[in-house]
Amino acid sequence: MPTYRAPVDEVMFLLRDVLHVERYNNLPGFAEASPDIVEAVLAEAAKFCEGVLAPLNRVGDKEGCRRHPDGSVTTPPGFKDAYKKLVAGGWVGASAPAEFGGQGLPTVLTQAIREFLYSSNMAFAMYSSLALGAVAAIYTHGSAEQKARYLPKLISGEWAGTMNLTEPQCGTDLGQLRCRAAPQPDGSYKITGTKIFISAGEHDLADNIIHLVLARIEGAPAGTKGISLFIVPKILLTADGGPGERNAVSCGSIEDKMGIHGNATCVMNYDGATGWLTGEKHRGLYAMFTMMNTARLSVGVQGLALSEVAYQNAVAYAKERLSGRAPRGAKFPDKAADPIIVHPDVRRMLMTVRAFNEAARALVLWTALKGDIARRSTDATEREAADDYMGLMTPVIKGVLTDQGFANTVAAQQIFGGHGYIAEHGMEQFVRDARITMIFEGANGIQALDLVGRKLPKDGGRALQAFFAEVSGYIKEADAAMAPYVKPLGQALGELREATQWFAQNAPGNPDNAGAGASDYMQLFGLVALGYMWCRIVDAAKVNLATAGMDDKLVTARFFMERMLPATTTHLARVKAGAESTMALPAEAF
C-alpha cells in the first residue's frame, strides 16, 4: 500500500525564502496570509490529504464509478464522505473572491494545496478542480445575474462544475463542433448534442452540476468563429434560486479507461437541455479559454504531484529492498545484501525525479504568484507583465511537467522491479493515472504548437523578450560562487535564443519547420525555466546553510545542471534539423 507525506516544509521554504511572498503584502489577500497562518493552512491540508484522501486512492482505482439504469452515477466508497469534509473545510474556493463567498487567499498558497490533493488522490481532486474552472469562466465572462446565481455555491463546493468541449468527431479541432443551440423566446437556448470525455460529468457528490457547454447557435458562422458558451445546470433553478426540475442532460455512459477510475469520465447527452449564453455570442471559445488555461495549469500540477508521490514511495522501497552489493564494496556487511539505494543507476533515477520535483514545484508556485499579480495588482503595467508571463508559461507547464511527470512515475515503478508491476504496491496506478495528463486539456503536441505558433510572436514577442531579459539579467548579476549553476544556465539560455531565432528565419517560409520542432522547443524552454528555478533555490539555500537539508539542495542543483540541463543541446539540434526528413515520406509509405 503506497504512502504519502505532503511536502509542507518544502513549500514553506519556497514561499518564504525563494519567492519572498511577504513582498507582495500590498496585494489583496496577502497581508492576511502571514507565515504562521500559511503554515497552519498547509499543515491542515496535509492532514486531510494524508489521512482522508490517500487511503481512498486505491479504493477509487479498484471500485471505479458506476452508472445506473436511470443515468445516475455513484462514486467509489468513501468519496462522498470525503467530499463533504472537503467542502466543510472550505478547501474548494479558498482563493475565490470574497464577494461570492470565497476566502480570497493567494492562489500561490492554494496551488500548493492542489498539489497535495492530486498527489494523495488525483481522481478525487479532479471533481473540485473542475468547479474552479467554471468559477473562473463565469467570473470573467458571466453577467452580474449569472455570477450571483452560480458562483456562491460553486465556490462553496455545494455545486460542482464541468467543461464540455469534445465531441465524437472533434477534439482539438473545435471548428467541427456540431452541438447546437436553439434560441427561445425567454432568452434561453435549447442545447442538443453529445459530448464525450467529460470529467465529473455526472456523480453523487454535489447537489447540482453546472455544465459549461460549447455549442453553435443556429445560423452561426462555420468554424471556431461561430461557437458560443452556455451554462447548462443539471438541475434547473427556480426564480428564487432553489432546486427545480431535472434538465434534459444525462450521462449516456462512463468511459472504460486506463486510469483515474475514481473520476466519472462521461458521455453526456443534451436532448434540448435548457441553457443560458455566457459571454458574447460566437465568442465561446474565447470565454472557454479562461477555463481551459486554469485547467491546463492545474494539469501541469498533476504531473508534478504524481511524480512526487511516486518518488516518495520509490525512495522508501530503495532504502528497504536488499539486492547485490555496492560497486565499491559492501555498505552493510552485516546484511545479506545492500539496499538498492547504494547502486548508482538507482541513484540516477531517484536524483532525476528529485531534481525535477523541486524545480517544478518552484516553477508552479512562481507562476501562481504571477497569476495573483495579474488579477490583484492595481498597477496596470505590472498586471500586463504578469499576464504576459502566464500566457507564455501555461503551455510549458502543462506540456513539460506532464511529460516529465509521467516519465518519472515510470522511473519510480522501475525502481520497484517486478513489484512495481503488481497493483498492491500502487506504482502501476501512478503510471496509469499520470498518462492522461499528457493528453487531456490539449495534448502536449498542441501545447508545443500553441507555444511556438501563438505565444512566441504575440505582441511582437513581448512576453518572450521579458523572460529572456529576466533570466539573462539574473545571470549577469550572479556572483562568482554561483558559477557552477549560472554558467550551464547561460549556455542553455543561449541555445533557447538560438532555437527561437532559427524559427524566426525558417518557419515563415515553411510552417512545417515550426511544427516539426515545436515539441523539442517546448522541452528546451522548460529545461531553461527549471534551471532558472534551481538557481533561485540555490541562492536561498546558500543564505540558509545552517538549516538542515540546504546542503542537499546544492547537490541536487548540481545534478540538474550536470545531468539534466545538457539535454538542451540535443533539443536545439532537433529544432535546427527542420522538417525535411520528418515530412519526406508520402502518407502511403506508412
Image (spheres, rainbow, N blue to C red):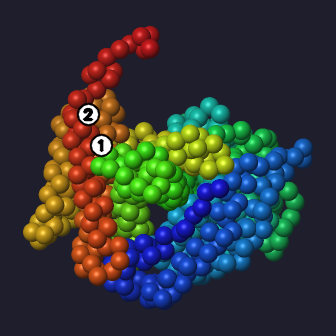
Check contact, mark 1 vs mark 2: CB within 8 A. Answer: no
| Residue 472 rendering spot, x and y as whole percentages | 16, 61
On-image quarter of the C terminus: top left
**Pick the front one: 517 or 44:** 44
Q: Name the image quarter holding residue 206.
A: bottom right
User: Residue at coordinates 87% horizontally, 46% vertically from top-left?
Assistant: 68
| Mark 2 residue element | helix
| Mark 1 residue element | helix
**Pick the front one: 458 or 307:** 307
Observer able to see residue 127? no
User: Which residue carries the number 1 mark?
Assistant: 521
Q: Which amino acid does label 2 sit on?
A: Arg
| Residue 479 rendering spot, x and y as whole percentages | 11, 71
Q: How many numbered callouts? A: 2
Neighbour tally class for label 1: few under 14, some 14-19, many 20 plus, Cα within 10 Å: many
Task: Note whether 130 is above or below 164 in the view shown.
Answer: below
User: Residue at coordinates 20% horizontally, 56% vertically from top-left?
Assistant: 489
| Residue 542 rendering spot, x and y as whole percentages | 24, 75
Label placed on residue 574: 2
